[in-house]
Image: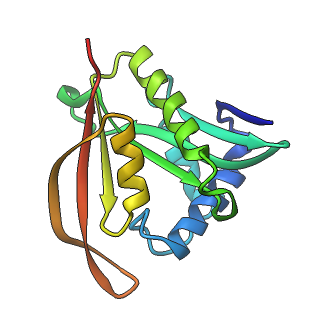
Amino acid sequence: MLIIRCATMSDLGALTEIYNEAILRTVATFDTKPKTVEEQKPWFESHDSKHPIFVAELDSVVIGWASLSKWSDRCAYSDTAEISVYVKEDHRGKEIGKKLMHEILDQGQKEGLHTVIARIAEFNEVSIHLHEVFGFQHVGTMRQVGRKFGKLLDVQLMQKIYES
C-alpha cells in the first residue's frame, strides 16, 4: 500500500538516491553531479511546515518525494514556493507523482501559500502535463538557460495561483 507522509531526516538517504538517479538520467534537474547525503542536509533543513517535503513509501521503501521550497529569501516572496517532484525510475507512470503533488499542493494551500512556481526543462512533456492537471499555467519560457547531456535546454515556467 502506498503511503504519502512528511519526510524525516531518516529519509534523507533515500531522497538523495532518488535525486541522484534524476541527476544522472534526466533533465528534471540541472544539477549534473550526484550529491552526498551530507551535501543535501542543508537543503533538507531549509524546509519547514510552509515548505514541506513529502515522501511516497511503498512496502516501507521510499520511492518518490515532493517538496515546496522557498522561491526567494526576499520577504516579498514569502507566499511563493517552488515545487519539485521526483519518482524512482522503476515506479514512474503509476500515478505516484500525481499523488505526491496532490498532497504537497494541499499542504501548501493550508499553510497559506499564494502561488507555486515550477521550472520544467523542455522535452519533459510528462511533467508539463502533470502540472497542467493541477492547474499550473505556462507563464514563460527561458531560452537556452541550461546545458545538460551536451544540449542547451529551454525551461518552461509554470505557475499555480491558489484560489482565495
**Is residue 125 placed above or below 147 in the rendered structure?**
above
Q: Furthest-top residue in view? A: 164
Q: Residue 111: x percent and y percent?
A: 42, 16
Q: Furthest-right residue in view? A: 59
Can residue 35 be seen in this snapshot?
no
Name the colouring of the figure: rainbow
Q: Image quarter for residue 31?
A: bottom left
Q: Residue 33: x percent and y percent?
A: 50, 74
Q: Is residue 150 left or right of residue 58?
A: left
Task: Give the camera-side residue of 67 and 77.
Answer: 67
Q: Is residue 152 left or right of residue 91?
A: left
Q: Residue at x 64, y 40 (%)?
A: 55
Task: Give the camera-side residue of 84 and 2.
Answer: 2
Q: Residue 113: x percent and y percent?
A: 33, 22
Q: Image quarter for residue 89?
A: bottom right
Can residue 66 be seen in this snapshot?
yes
Q: Residue at x 41, y 54 (%)?
A: 127
Q: Is residue 135 left or right of residue 46?
A: left
**Is residue 158 placed above or below 48 in the rendered structure?**
below
Q: Residue 16: x percent and y percent?
A: 63, 57
Q: Residue at x 54, y 28 (%)?
A: 103
The N terminus lies in quadrant: top right
The C terminus lies in quadrant: top left
